[in-house]
Amino acid sequence: MSLMSPRGLVLPTALFAVLCIYALITAVQLTVSQNYQVTRQGHDKTRARYLAHAACQLVLKGLNEDAGFEAAHKGFDARLVTPMEGGRLESWVEPTDKTDVILVRGLGTLDNGASQPFGLTVRKRPIVAGRVYTRPGVSNATTFYGIAAERLTSGAATPEDWQPVPPVPNTYYDSKGNVVDGTSDESTRNDFTAFARWVAADTRGNLFAIRYREDRPDTVLKLDGTTQKWSLLPPVPNSRYSSAGTLIPTTTTASALTDLVSDGDNRLYVRNGKDGIDTVWTMDLSATTPSWSALPPTPLHNVDRYGNSTPVPNRFVGNLRDFSAAPDGTLFARHSREGVDALYKYDGRWSLLPPTPKTYYRRVRDPLTGQYMLEAVQSEDGLAAYNLKGLSSNRDSELYAVFSRDGIDTIYKYDGSKWEVLPPAPAIFLQNAALETTGGTSTQGAGNVTESAVDGAGNLYVRWVREGVDSLFMYSPDRGRYWLVPPIPNRQWSKRGPSPTLLDYSDRTGNQGILPNLYELTGGGKRDPAGRWRYTPKGTF
Amino acid sequence: MRRGFTLGEVVVAVAVLAIAVLALVTVQAYALRATVANREQLMASEIAGSVMAGLQAQFSGEFPSVALPRTPVAGRDGFEYEVIEAFEDPPDNVLKRVTVKVYYKDRSGDHVYTLWTFFHDNTT
């Protein structure tokens, strides 16, 4: 055989080709097998992750039902292990640097060993039955009313669910801080019930109000949630800040108190000052001997209509309004100057909040259906929101504010770092005590929200004024929907005593027995008597 | 001098190559089937995950009823899904077991991909 002859090479060549083909086959098999494994692992990971999710849900149930669960399952070593078909659930609780936030960690493991984690950030709050209070929108009111949030969420609330709170007694401090029985006063001899305003509520069922008379110092009173008896809190000093920001002490009692608010826990705030620089007083009711102390004066900022701000050195704010407080020691207030709002926050020092969004709701007509609807638009003229109303904050120091433009309200929420726009309040309003309403759907939007309040359970209430009759709505941020609040039957405490008498004025108004106008909406509530906590997931990881 | 191959050489070589090519074709067919099956399985897993993610959003702030009978998956011929729910803790009824099943077929027969988890009622 010569080298030129292919004879004898055909078999080796064929075998080489076969080898190549088998190499190809092996490669294809490996690829297919690997693809299968990857897909299988992906499936297992998804299954295991949902097992881990299930493990976290088991912990949520345990936390909300068993007061000792959190302590019993703190840390991986104390984890709850639950065998399930096809796998195993493991879950435990970890603390964070915030006392009211915990982490719930879950681990889902399949029988084949595939394992995945899942985590929840969980907010821990005392269980509070939310309640909202208000009073008639008249200058001389004797009666506050309250209604329970759970009646509203049940969908079965009626006007009769509004309960008048016991009347404020005719007792007050004189200018020297002595307690005076108003029934011995010549001009109010027969008055056993006093005019009161600026009602505030905590989450222990207590109410606070300012008893006032034009010619007397103002007095802050507390209604004990358990005994339902009013008592006087220490007199608020009349000491005021000078224009230079120096507190000028006096021994007299304040007589221009407004904006009484509670932080929901133990702290009260009240503003003293008709003219000049405001003095904001605060009191910790849990202190052994509660007493009023003044916050530092609020530094003035120049804020323009576009949201730009510059501090004004050595000048301080007068006429702060719309106080709202949270249990972490945060106080919010609004200062309005030439129609431009500056929102202040006090958390140990005063600071200015960022400007509200330049987004607002506008009513537009759908070209297809011809129906009006709302759309969120950017301010074309670049103006920030102005003439803000309805400031209120919740337990998480989140602030709500309402902006009206072109007859439509936009509700903003500030979460501590940024503003967001909430869904519009429904354009439905009350006509009478029979709960007859007119108006359209939520897509038409409310146009004159003037007040808001947040109760101890975190529900937001807004008061909407239209055609002389106020309508209240409750918005649940957890559920993302509004409820219409029934109107208040027109029954008010008689000033004459000595026993409180509820007079029925339902036949004196032209609104079929309801109070047409309301004022000073405030939220509060009562904690669970057993001291239980509610654990709510706020995020996943 | 003899030139060319013997008949025997050619027959053996062709036979060897034929067996190898047949094996290659068989493996390719298997690979194709396996790839299709993989793709279907992946699709089923994605559908189940997507349905479950949608349910998670529904359970945010609410505790709705989410049961759904076997329903074709829009835009995915041959795929159907079903949502089954059952309370895990009667009579408390605050913990719901939700199972998503995705049904599909391939050449090897009928298949079902199952995902399940719990949802706690956070509205109470």
Image (spheres, coloured by chain):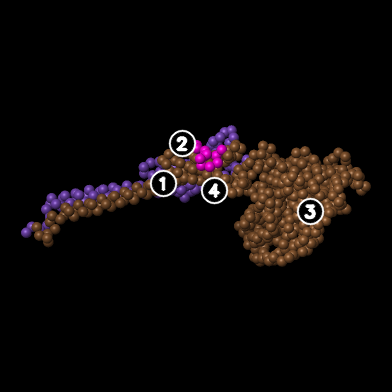
Q: Disc 2 marks which residue?
A: A85
The residue that label 4 is drawn on is A540
Chain of the residue on which disc 1 is drawn: A
Type of amino acid under label 2:
Glu
What amino acid does circle 4 point to? Thr
Is the residue under label 3 in contact with that under label 1 (CB below 8 Å)?
no
Q: What residue is drawn where x is 69% and y is 57%?
A: A349
Q: Is the residue marked by circle 3 packed among few (<14), some (14-19), or many (20+) residues within 10 Å?
A: many
Could you say whether the residue bearing mark 1 is in a helix, strand or loop? helix
What's the distance in space between the residues labelled 1 and 3, CA to CA? 65 Å
Residue A79 on the magenta span: yes
Colour for chain B in the figure:
purple
Question: Which range of residues does the magenta coloring cover?
Answer: A72-84
Residue B50 seen in the figure: yes
Give the label, 4 or 1, closer to the camera: 4
What residue is at 61 percent from the left and 46 percent from the top?
A99
Q: Position of residue A233 (x, y in %)?
A: 79, 46
Q: State which mark lies toward you, 2 or 4.
A: 4
Judged from the image, the secondary structure of the residue bearing numbered disc 3 is strand
